[in-house]
Amino acid sequence: MMNQKRLVEKDSPRTKDDLIVIAGAGGFIAGNLVLFFKKKGFKRIRAVDKKPLAEWYLRVPGVESLSLDCSQEDSCRRVCEGAVEVYNLAADMGGMGFIERFRIECLRSILINTHMIEAAYRAGAKRYFFSSSACAYNTLLQQDPKVRALKESDAYPAMAERGYGWEKLMSEMFCEEYWHERGLKTFMARFHNVYGPHGTWDGGREKAPAAICRKVIEAIDTGNDTIDIWGDGTQTRSFMYIDDCVKGIDMITHHDPLIATPINLGSSELVSINELVSKVEKIARIKLKRKYDLAAPRGVAGRNSDNTFIKKILGWEPSTTLDRGLSATYQWIKQQYYARKAGRRVVE
Ligand code: NAD
């Protein structure tokens, strides 16, 4: 029976020699996760991404780095060989501009999770983590900027974000059933907008905090005193700093009461896009004229993370303030911007 309770067996404590596999490691969050585990002293980390190695945001020395496509079954088997823990953060994704336009690409990420979880199971991995998203929540609950924060039970009845959100919901279900039917310990976090250094900051896949930092930097550099804002700026969101995100992933994946249980991983500091722009302007010590592009993708009207559950179960929640996190992000993007302008390699 689907909801039959499984006995949670205690596994042997993890050791620094356990092989950790991290997919999507050429990207923002998984790249930072590799760095996090490396700094914690894990000696055997295998990182994988379909991007050529030269394009990874972060290359961590001493980590086995593979350029393979995880939507292919064979690659996943190779990648998961000998794995004790598997973290799947690979997905074809981007900010609103990307996920509203490329729904098919977003949906096709289902192949990555389908093959990765099966390969992890076959390899005898002890734990499997999947990066879900707040886009899995029912969009009907997000039509007002003054939203009530979303709690875990708000995903059903389902009316997820078209494309991207439905893929996340379906992949969550795979994770739940791999536990119920096959006993693979699976963990899922629903991330709410993550930002920080070593992420996408231009090219069309970047998210609001990085896009706004870049636009302010460009405005200063070019002497243009106007900033383009997508929508009317009243949309509200919460933004989680990357350090909180990787710490949360580790905590969630090693807390057995959370097996097969989606949980919010996000900040509960709600801001409007207008407020976000003001914060970046303050960091840059500039004031720009705002031009609102009402035809641009803007996503749901409001979204925030209800952290009641994570505080109760882990006694913790992401707490880096937006002011602190944005300031570090702004400095990093500024350095990347001028390095690129000077013709230097910007991915390092
Ligand atoms: P990212 O785009 O920086 O990283 C994803 C990486 O996956 C990319 O480097 C990409 O090349 C790789 N990838 C795509 N298809 C692949 C394939 N077939 N095989 C191997 N690698 C492949 O994105 P991110 O912000 O680091 O997101 C990581 C995960 O977190 C994703 O699952 C994303 O949906 C989820 N998430 C992110 C946010 C956020 O705010 N950044 C919010 C909610 C959920």
Image (tube, rainbow, N blue to C red):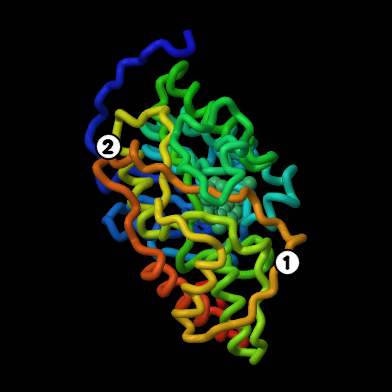
For the residue carrying disc 1, how many other residues have a C-alpha within 10 Å: few (<14), some (14-19), or many (20+)? some
Tell me which amino acid carries mark 1.
Asp
Residue 62, by quadrant, is bottom left
Residue at position x 54%, y 79% from top? 336
Q: Which of marks 2 and 1 is in front?
A: 1
Which quarter of the picture shows residue 152?
top left
The one of 145 and 212 positioned closer to us in this rendering:
145
Which residue is denoted by mark 2 in the rendering? 312
What's the residue at 48%, 75% (across, down)?
Answer: 330
The residue drawn where x is 53% and y is 43% is 133
Whole-number angstrom distance, CA of label 2 to CA of label 1: 41 Å
Q: Which of 96 and 245 is in front in this view?
A: 96
Q: What element carries label 2?
A: helix
**Which residue is disc 1 drawn over?**
293
> Percent x, y for residue 101?
75, 52
Q: Is mark 1 on a helix, strand or loop?
A: strand
* Residue type, numbered disc 2: Lys
Name the residue at 51% across, 79% down. Answer: 281
**Is there any visible trace of residue 182 in the rendered image?**
yes
